[in-house]
């Protein structure tokens, strides 16, 4: 997790820096002496995630929206490195409200790029794309050059469209872009995704856990610290105009195994699992990719490898979330 020497005192903008992944990235950048500005509308992020940096002279927080021109002008001024993480990451909502992903992910990315074109292009633009751009890939583990790309969710489409915009702006206006296609990134501060959902459900009913789908969905999970170290490695060791990297772990686990790990970590012994059966052959929801494992050979060729496998990352995440809840549990009657 070493960004030392990469930033050289340049002003770094992190969009969505008060969110789950963004705040861990901010921690790593600040720990390495960077000068960081965050723009976040706090729609899903929270100030608690970045509270330790507020008041630090090398840190600035702008409560602002990427769809607001004035906020963007303020945020992009003099920035030389951009980490663009702000987005609506809830794949599930796409089937009922597709315009959310179009506006928050595609239009917001376009507006950010346009604001940069006016204020002066950065040296480096890093984007958190997603494994969902591959859709139901027939090649597993799926490499970066797999194609044609046929996303099955509006979210996946919005990430692919954003990748295309970033690539074309990089070529047309001259900056370096790194596009990261992430597997499921997990860890403390995450407020969405399967582990968080299971913990919330089990807190309200410790005897029965509803599991969306048929339980056989199988995906790859990466601990957030490993994500940050992967990103640092890519920035340090690559020099291409537009680089695309998968970031994930080397294995995958099914959703039933996740349920077992979470119930173990909550010390719940008599939980019955109730599978909803799901849609379209056992998927959790419309647009859910049922089997996802990314090839990380390209990333490993740079000398990086994940410290934790999927099951270890899931267990550590559940434990960290529960530890934090435990600190506040005196207010509730839920016991761990
Ligand atoms: N967590 C994962 O497993 C995963 C996997 C693939 C890709 N990603 C991508 O990584 C990025 C971060 O995801 P996360 O899991 O930390 O989610 P998150 O919801 O915690 O973070 C997103 C942040 O962006 C902010 N935001 C949203 N819309 C905004 C807007 N219009 N203007 C300003 N701020 C806005 C939110 O308040 C939040 O703080 C997203 O781009 C997501 O699509 C995440």
Image (spheres, grey):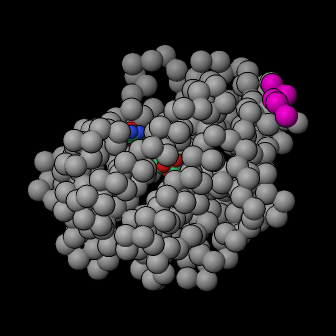
- Residue 96: x and y in percent read 64, 25
Indicate left or right for 28 with 126 as reference.
Answer: left
Indicate left or right for 252 with 114 as reference.
Answer: right
Q: Quadrant of residue 326?
A: top left
Q: Residue at x 66, y 51 (%)?
A: 132
Which quadrant is home to the C terminus?
top right
Mostly what secondary structure, the magenta segment?
loop
Q: Quadrant of residue 121?
A: bottom left
Residue 27 makes an appearance in the image? no
Specify whether residue 273 is painted magenta. Answer: no
Q: Which segment is the magenta one?
A: 276-280
Q: Quadrant of residue 67?
A: top left
Q: Residue furthest front?
A: 172
Q: Nearer the viewer, residue 333 or 56?
A: 56
Q: Residue furthest right?
A: 281
Residue 241 makes an appearance in the image? yes
- Residue 11: x and y in percent read 22, 64
Q: Residue at x 63, y 77 (%)?
A: 298
Looking at the image, how many numbered discs can be counted on the residues? Answer: 0
Indicate left or right for 70 with 49 as reference.
Answer: left
Q: Nearer the viewer, residue 42 or 176?
A: 176
Q: Is residue 230 above or below residue 118?
A: below
- Residue 204: x and y in percent read 59, 18
Q: Is residue 60 above or below residue 307?
A: above
């Amino acid at each position: 997790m070493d960004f030392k020497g990469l930033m050289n005192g340049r002003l770094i903008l992190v969009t969505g820096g008060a969110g789950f992944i963004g705040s861990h990235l901010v921690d790593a950048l600040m720990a390495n002496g960077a000068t960081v500005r965050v723009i976040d509308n706090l729609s899903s992020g929270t100030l608690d995630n970045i509270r330790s940096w507020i008041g630090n002279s090398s840190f600035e927080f702008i409560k602002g929206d990427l769809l607001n021109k004035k906020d963007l002008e303020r945020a992009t001024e003099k920035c030389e490195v951009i980490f663009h993480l702000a987005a609506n990451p809830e794949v599930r909502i796409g089937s009922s409200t597709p315009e959310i992903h179009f506006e928050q992910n595609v239009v917001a990315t376009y507006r950010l790029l346009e604001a940069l074109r006016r204020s002066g292009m950065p040296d480096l633009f890093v984007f958190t794309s997603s494994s969902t751009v591959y859709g139901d890939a027939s090649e597993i583990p799926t490499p970066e050059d797999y194609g044609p790309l046929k996303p099955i969710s509006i979210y996946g489409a919005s990430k692919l469209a954003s990748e295309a915009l970033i690539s074309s702006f990089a070529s047309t206006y001259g900056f370096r872009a790194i596009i990261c296609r992430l597997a499921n990134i997990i860890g403390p501060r995450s407020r969405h995704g399967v582990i968080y959902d299971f913990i919330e459900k089990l807190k309200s009913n410790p005897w029965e856990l509803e599991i969306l789908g048929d339980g056989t969905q199988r995906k790859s999970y990466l601990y957030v610290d490993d994500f940050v170290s992967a990103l640092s490695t890519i920035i340090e060791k690559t020099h291409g105009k537009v680089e695309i990297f998968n970031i994930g772990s080397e294995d995958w686990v099914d959703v039933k195994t996740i349920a077992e790990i979470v119930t173990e970590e909550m010390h719940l012994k008599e939980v019955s699992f109730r599978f909803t059966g799901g849609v379209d052959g056992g998927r959790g929801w419309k647009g859910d990719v049922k089997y996802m494992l990314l090839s990380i050979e390209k990333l490993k060729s740079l000398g990086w490898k994940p410290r934790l496998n999927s099951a270890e990352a899931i267990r550590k995440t559940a434990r960290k979330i529960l530890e934090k809840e435990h600190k506040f549990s005196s207010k509730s009657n839920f016991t761990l």
